[in-house]
């Protein structure tokens, strides 16, 4: 049974928020709905995001960025997690009905310049940090009795 929506916000909804959404979906299953959105959504999920998430067995090939307004006032949001500083400054400071707001910014791997291997290393580092943090978020929800 779903207990509301866990919404992950970022600026472009093309890297970090997509990673967090995928990890949360894999951990929460049907226990809670999960989505991600951006304040200024990009045109597509970054190909390096798709690649490094596939290394973890998570397929993002069909994911597309969406705008947070698609959810504002339209979905019963339990938790809003902001995963970049810029989104935290541009998204609503309160979310109607949301019980929790988490601000947990991660470095933007798309901002890294260098060789393909250097860029992949940055994406993997952020992916692994998000993986660990989403595990903490799920444990917190379980500890609060929000999800069983």
Image: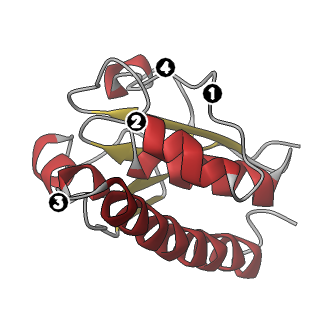
Up-down relation of residue 32 to residue 62 (above or below): below
**Closer mark to the observer between disc 3 and disc 1:** 1
Q: Nearer the viewer, residue 79 or 11?
A: 11
Q: Residues within 10 Å of mark 1 (few under 14, many from 20)?
A: some
Residue 62, percent across and down? Answer: 63, 21
Q: Are marks 3 and 2 in contact (CB under 8 Å)?
A: no
Q: Looking at the rendering, which quadrant does residue 135 occupy?
A: bottom right
Up-down relation of residue 42 to residue 49 (above or below): above
The span from disc 1 to disc 2 (Cα, nearest Å) is 10 Å
Which residue in the protein does label 4 denote? 74
The span from disc 4 to disc 3 (Cα, nearest Å) is 25 Å
Q: Nearer the viewer, residue 114 or 61?
A: 114
Disc on res. 61: 1
Q: Are marks 1 and 4 in contact (CB under 8 Å)?
A: no
The C terminus lies in which quarter of the figure?
Answer: bottom right
State left or right for residue 36 relative to residue 35. left
Say if residue 117 shows up in the picture.
yes
Q: Earlier in the sequence, mark 3 or mark 1?
A: 1
Which residue in the protein does label 3 denote? 85
Residue 123, percent across and down? Answer: 41, 60
Q: Earlier in the sequence, mark 1 or mark 4?
A: 1
Q: Earlier in the sequence, mark 3 or mark 2?
A: 2
Q: Earlier in the sequence, mark 1 or mark 2?
A: 2
Which residue in the protein does label 2 denote? 46
* Kind of element beneath mark 3: helix
Say if residue 78 shows up in the picture.
no
* Kind of element beneath mark 4: loop
């Amino acid at each position: 049974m779903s207990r509301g929506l866990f919404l992950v916000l970022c600026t472009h909804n093309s890297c970090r928020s997509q990673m967090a959404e995928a990890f949360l979906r894999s951990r929460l299953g049907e226990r809670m709905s999960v989505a991600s959105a951006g304040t200024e959504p990009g045109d597509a999920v970054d190909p390096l995001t798709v690649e490094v998430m596939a290394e973890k067995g998570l397929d993002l090939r069909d994911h597309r960025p969406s705008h947070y307004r698609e959810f504002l006032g339209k979905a019963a949001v339990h938790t809003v997690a902001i995963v970049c500083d810029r989104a935290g400054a541009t998204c609503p400071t309160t979310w109607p009905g949301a019980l929790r707001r988490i601000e947990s910014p991660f470095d933007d791997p798309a901002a890294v310049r260098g060789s393909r291997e250097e860029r992949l290393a940055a994406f993997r580092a952020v992916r692994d940090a998000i993986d660990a943090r989403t595990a903490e978020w799920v444990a917190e929800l379980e500890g609060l009795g929000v999800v069983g």
